[in-house]
Structure formats: structure tokens, C-alpha cells
Image: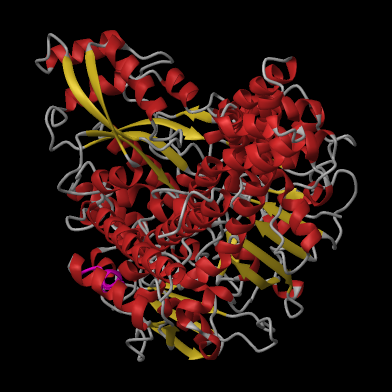
Amino acid sequence: MPHISVISRRVAAAAVSVVLVGGAAACGPKGGGAAQNGADGAPKKGGTLTVLNRQPQNKFDPARLYTSGGGNIPSLVFRTLTTRHRADGTEGTKVVPDLATGTGTPSDDAKVWTYKLKDGLTYEDGTPITSADIKYGVERSFAPELSGGAPYLRDWLIGGEDYQGPYKEKKGLDSIETPDAKTIVFHLRKSEGDFPYFATSTQFAPVPKDKDTGAKYAEHPVSSGPYKVVRNTNDGEQLELERNPHWSEDTDKERHAYPDRIEVKSGLSSAVINQRLSTGAGPDAAAVTTDTNLGPAELAQVGNDKSLAARVGTGHFGYTNYLAFNPEVKPFDNPKVRQAIAYAVNRTSVVNAAGGSALAEPATTFLPDRKTFGYTPYDHFPAGDKGNAAKAKELLKEAGYDNGLEITLTHSTAQDFETSPEIATALQAALKEAGITVKLEGLESNDYDEKVHSFKDQPGLFLAHWGADWPSGGPFLAPIFDGRQIVKDGANFNTARLDDPKVNDEIDAINKITDHDAAAQRWGALDRTIGEQALTVPLFHPVYKRLVGKDVKNVVISDWTGVLDVSQVAVK
Amino acid sequence: MNGLAGYFLRRALGALAVVLVLSLVVYATFYIAPGDPARLACGPRCNPEQLRQVREQLSLGDPFYLQYWHFLQGLVAGHDYSTGTGVLHCTAPCFGQSYQSNQLVTDLLAERLPVTASLALGAMVLWLLLGIGTGLLSALRRGGATERVLTWLTLAGTATPVFITGLGLLMLFCVYLEWLPFPTYVPLADDPEQWAWNLALPWAALALLESAKYARLTRSSMLETLAEDHIRTFRAYGLTERAVVGRHALRGALPPVIALTAVDLGSMFGNAVLTETLFGLPGLGQLLVHATQTIDIPVVVAVVMVTGTAVVLANIVADVLYAVADRRVALR
């Protein structure tokens, strides 16, 4: 997942933060912070939960959503074959059955995956969910009318490459078999041990063929989850969800669905969202946000207010911000130049530019620092806290740049605190100490995206980021370092253009492993090996700080999503 | 055809030409601008084959002139779109289908226009009341403490960005005093009272920003009019000061205010994005910004056309009011 729009730190730099924080200090909740995780009593059913967001929950069609683990709000409406375990921290990175009785039975070296559906599964209208509905849901995600989802199905399923969905090709995909109403079998082109993780995506939600309205389905998708959509205004800008009377806890051990009603209101500014959560007036007392972080100034203020501090949840999502090289552009073809840059970076100043140590953790590994990814610590080019200018100069000399070097760093002008000017400027200053003069090339965000992902135009050095589609090393390393994923006529994420048979073979070998822990170890080792080539310079992993309303209980934040799980929240 | 009807017909044709030229310029600008709408619609990791299918689905492979021609055809004759399972008919004037959400642009406009119209018209009433009132007081209390205070206040209003003013109002009325809820748009037809209460702060934020220049304009225009010979004559005839100011001087000072109001009101339809974002109002400004970021050309063109139409219409109304306010002006 190259970009997740849910992350925002814009408030960090905005002058309005000062105004906001002043308010937060003076007008925090008068009754004190309600205890989290049910500490003031067990969570109960009832009430209305309000979700205040910046970005609308648009394209609310299971075929069109690009989610990690089925998403947050979408997961309330769309149940999938498997789902993420709704538990705090590391425990929450596990994949568990949802509609299926298990996480999948592999065969033929994990090229075939079989699922059996649970008994008693129904849609919001009480009609039973069948395996054919799940097959149909997967197939319609191939329709060009319903584009937007993750690319894996097209890549993995036999016959998926040029399939155009059931509207144009009614016959469907032969690689998805439904021998009976409760069984579904997927035939893949290659081994994919992570298939159960990917089966958490909304594309694996059932869609009843006779209720499919194609491009208009998002207006009223048929629910299989604990809530149904009663109103979808302005393409997800306002979403009203009510309890689905046909959902049963007996078949769903993961979602609690405490509130009777959930109202999603978006299109708000970060400052207003945090202010409303802080004040907690009226319905805002039972409000949360799923896409807005606290900024550094707000965090500093929250630290001085115990009742507010008790309402801040901290989360980690598998995400790495890094410097990317295109080794086909000089002088980055020279490993010593890349290594010199790796030595020269000052991660302290970069972390400060990203919002400070509360919002970013320095990174020396490409894989995020969580066990589930196979995190294996390494620091091949130790720069210390402030950068190692002396070692960088030494390497530049060895590379033939005795008098220093002049290079261009491409970045986005979007104020996202990831690929934005603040980070670029911090790097520019650090590299200058090593005798590297950095010229900054700031591009408008669409221009930036197009250029840095174009095989032909990819700059030699640019700021990049990568997020996990699921918590495993595979979706982190394969798109970036698998030579067969170099895309010459589309979006290319293997910016290092690495096409090393040894790396490719190891990726294939790990994909055959269905034991997640065993695979994780191998991913970690592979990350460490690739890291020696200095094809990227990891900079930092983001940390998420989210404020919740004063009446919100049972806050669960897993390391899968890094944000509170709406399906666990109670307001009573 | 009498003079007035001819006037309106000429203005309407002129307006149509302006809006069409505007649409062509915007279409062309976004066509050549960096970024690929098909890729944005297709998703961040869309593969080349899928991208080709989406491009074909959105007719983005056609040359520019053909795409624009289809757009014009839709405006005149409507258009049918495939939903996959059926056909979605878009009646004329059809602005097309959003590349990103698949919604008809006319539906998007119908949802957003009432929000922006409510915001702009309400704010206009308030900024005129505040601006003209303050300008009048400043002119009549020239050189006194009242004028100095009012001048200072209007300058502060102009100098403060709406984002700061808006946040300040939210803090004061929603947080400290708790007199008002955090605004949520309630349609006028659903509940007029809640519609007004929820829009009170956005109106005030915009009015505080805009009223300053109206105050300055009214003051200078009023001072200029009060110095004219005919006002001295009215005073010599023994008319009361109230009659001189209210009936004659104000009327003479209003035309430039009317002209400015027309421009501001029209542009407010597309430019109130900061206010809409701050107060969470799903209006045209927000739609335009989002569509611009995602290169959703049909939506961008439609919003620009609506904004352009609003500016042109507001100017026509202003011309009529101008003529009513100043009898020396005739509509031709």
C-alpha cells in the first residue's frame, strides 16, 4: 500500500494548532476523562457513536475499497472470509476466521486455498450468504467500473490478468470454484502463503448477485456485518449506520458492535476534529476519529492535562518512510555514493521534521519494527543520532568525489510530513555536513506521484513511503525488491530496479511457507541482506496518536491498523 | 422586443458564451496538467492491463477535442452511462460522471449547491448589514473616537484569515460559552431553525472577513456623496439629516457597494472552501478542491461553470439594482 490517506499531521505546522491547543487546555472535558478499555465498568450495548473524519469514506463498495485488514468503517458492514484479530498490540496482527470456519486450508504448495463457510450466515435482509456470493464479490472487483482495490487478485488468480469482471464476462473465473453453497476454492498462479491475510480484504465480502447495482452499489451495499448503511450522503461524506438485526454474535466473535448507531461525519479540518474530541460537547463526548492524528503542539498540551492524556491512544501501523534511489541515474549507480548518503543522514532532525519523537521513530531497517513483519534489527551504515559525516566523506573520496558532490532530491510539496519539504530540508542540512550539496526539487503531489513511479522518469533520489497491506514481510518487500514486479508501463514501486535471481527465488520460497512465524524469520533475513546494498535509506516509522471522546470505552488498538478499532468501541 | 427583455437576452447570451469559454479553458488546462485521472480512479497499484480497461471505461483514450465534444453533447442531449448491471441515464444538461465516485455530476451539484448557496447568501446579508452599517457610522462620526475604533476593527477583520476568525468563533461560542453546537449542515427544508443556528457561525466568520472592505467602501463612497453639491442643496432646503443621509446620500453611495457584492457573492460559490472545511459544510468549494486533487475533470468543469454562472448572474442582478439605485444609469 504505497499511501494511506488516513494519516495526517498537517495540524503539526499549522498556526491554528496554537489556537486549538490553547482551547484544549482551557476547556478540556469538565468531568475528567472516562476510563479507557472499560476501566470504569464493562462496556454495554446502546447509544450512538460519532466518527469525525477529514476524509470521506468514499467508494463504499467492497470491490472498490483498498483496505488493510478490511478497513475500519468498512469492516462494520462487510464481513470477509478471514479478518484481523480485534486485540491490542501484537496479538492484533493475527489473522482469524470471519465468514469462514478457518483461515484457509492450503494445498499444492499454497497454490490452492479452500474455505468452508460457517452455518447461519445471513445478509441484512435475512437471506443466506453462500460461497457463490463470495465468488461473485471477488469477480466484480475485476470490473473496470469498480476499480480501486488492491492488485493482488489480478496477479494471483489463474486467469485474472485480463479478466474484466462478471458484467462483461458473465462466465466468471474458473479459478474460483464453489463445489457447494458452503465451500469456495481459489486456484492461484503461484504459491501464496499469505493468502489468509489477503482474504481479510473487502473484495472477499459476499455480494448478492440479484442485489448488485454495479457502479451504484456503494449507495446501498448489502450488509453482512453488524451494521447496515441507512444513508450514504455525498459519496461517503456522511454515513449513517444502524444495527443489522440479522447479524449474530454467534457467528462473529471478533466484532462487538456495542453502539446501536454509528454516524460518520467527514470533510472536517484536523484542528476542528481534535477540538471537538477534546471538548466533548453533546454527541462529541461519544466520538472518535479514524483518520486524524494529534499534532506535536497538541501533544505537548495534552501532556499537561491528565484527563486529556488518558484519552490518547497510541498505535503502530506497518509503515516506513525512506529515501529511494534509482541506481540507473548517476551518481547513484555507485554503491559508495549510496552508502555515503546512508551514513550522512541525521535521523534526529528528520524525526523532528516529521513531528517529533512522539510521532516518528527512527528507522534503520526497511521492515517495520514489529515481529509480525519479521523485524530483524540491523544498521549496516550506522549514522548515529546526528549522522556520520566523516565516514560519508571518506566513502565519497573512495567513490572519486574528493571535493564533495552535488545531487537533486525530489519530494512532494504536499504538507504530509512524509515526503514533504520539511523532511527534504532536514536531509539537505545533514548531507551538507558531509560535503553533499542537495538541490531540492519539490513537485505538486500528482506530478510527484506520477514522476517517482514512472519507470522512464524516476528521479535518482527521492522521498518515498511504503505501508503494509497486511502485517507480513511479503507485501512489504516483494513490491519493492522483486525483479518481476518492475513495471515499465505503469506504476513502478521497485525503484531500485533490483532484479536479483537470488532475491526473487527467496521471495518465491518464502511465499510457499504457510507458517507465519517461520516465514517472518525468512523475510527479516531477506530484508537484512537486501539492506546491505543501500538501495534505500530507511528514515522513520510513524506513530499514531489519536484522541477519543470522554464517553468512549473499550479502546482497542492493534499493530495491524495502528488506530482504534471501531468495532470494539462502546459509548455506554 | 422591448428594451428590458432585449437587455436580458443579450446578457444571457453573453453569459452563456463566457461560461462555455470557461469550460473549454478548464477542460484544456486539466487535460494537459500532470497526473492521470485513470490511474487515480484505478488505485495506487493498478496494473497496466487494469489501467487500460479503466481508461477505456472513462473514455480517457479519446483525443482532447473528442472528449470535450462529448461533454458538450451531454450538456445538450444528455448521456447514458453503464453501471455494469444497467444503464444510468443522465438528463440534459448532463455534466458527465465523476471519474472517482461514478456519481452523476448533476447529482453532486444538486447535493452541494444548496449548502454553498445557504452559506453565501446568509453571509452576504450579514456582511452587508455589518459593512454598510459600520461604513455609515464611520462616515457620519468622521474624525471621532467611533470612527477610529470602527476603522481599527474593520482593518483587523480584513487582516485576519477566515480560518483564524472561524476557529475563534468556534472556541468562543461552542467551547467556552457552549451557546451553539459545532455546526452540521441541516437542510433548510428539514428544519429552518436548525439550518440557521448551524450556519450562524460560518455566516459570521465570512461576514467578519468581508464586511471590512464594505465598511471602507461605504465610508469613502458616503463621504464623497455627502460632499456633493446636491446634498448641500438638500440641506439648504431644510431636509432633516436623517432624510439627507437615508434617502439621498446613501442611495448615491450604494452603487459601488452593489457592484462589489455581485462579484463577491458569485465568487463565494467556489471560493468558500476554507470556511466549508473548517465548519464541515459539504459545499461546492470542498467538492472543487477534492476534484482538483483527483483530476476529476467533469466535476471540476461543472463546479467552475456553476461558479462562473453565479458570478455572471450576480452581475446581471447588480446591473439592475445599480439602475434602480442610480436613475442616471439605464439598462441597454
Q: How many marks?
A: 0
What residue sits 35% from the left and 40% below the top? A527
Range drawn in magenta:
B52-61
Where, by quadrant of the figure, is residue B332 drawn? bottom left
User: Magenta includes B243?
Assistant: no
User: Magenta includes B58?
Assistant: yes
Q: Is residue B230 above or below residue A495?
A: above
For the C terminus of chain A, the image quarter is bottom right
Percent from the top left, x then y, of residue A356? Answer: 54, 24
Q: Nearer the viewer, residue A430 or B129?
A: B129
Q: Is residue A216 above or below residue A543?
A: below
Percent from the top left, x then y, of residue B313? Answer: 47, 60
Percent from the top left, x then y, of residue B268? Answer: 52, 49
Q: Is residue A178 left or right of residue B18?
A: right
Snapshot colouring: secondary structure
What residue sits 68% from the left and 25% below the top? B138
User: Is residue A400 in sight in this rendering?
Assistant: yes
Percent from the top left, x then y, of residue B71? Answer: 31, 72
Q: Is residue A232 left or right of residue A422?
A: right
Q: Nearer the viewer, residue A509 or A120?
A: A120
What residue sits 77% from the left and 65% below the top? A261
Q: Is residue B29 above or below residue A434?
A: below
Q: Nearer the viewer, residue A533 or B74?
A: B74
Prevailing secondary structure of the magenta residues: helix
Q: Nearer the viewer, residue A176 or A31?
A: A31
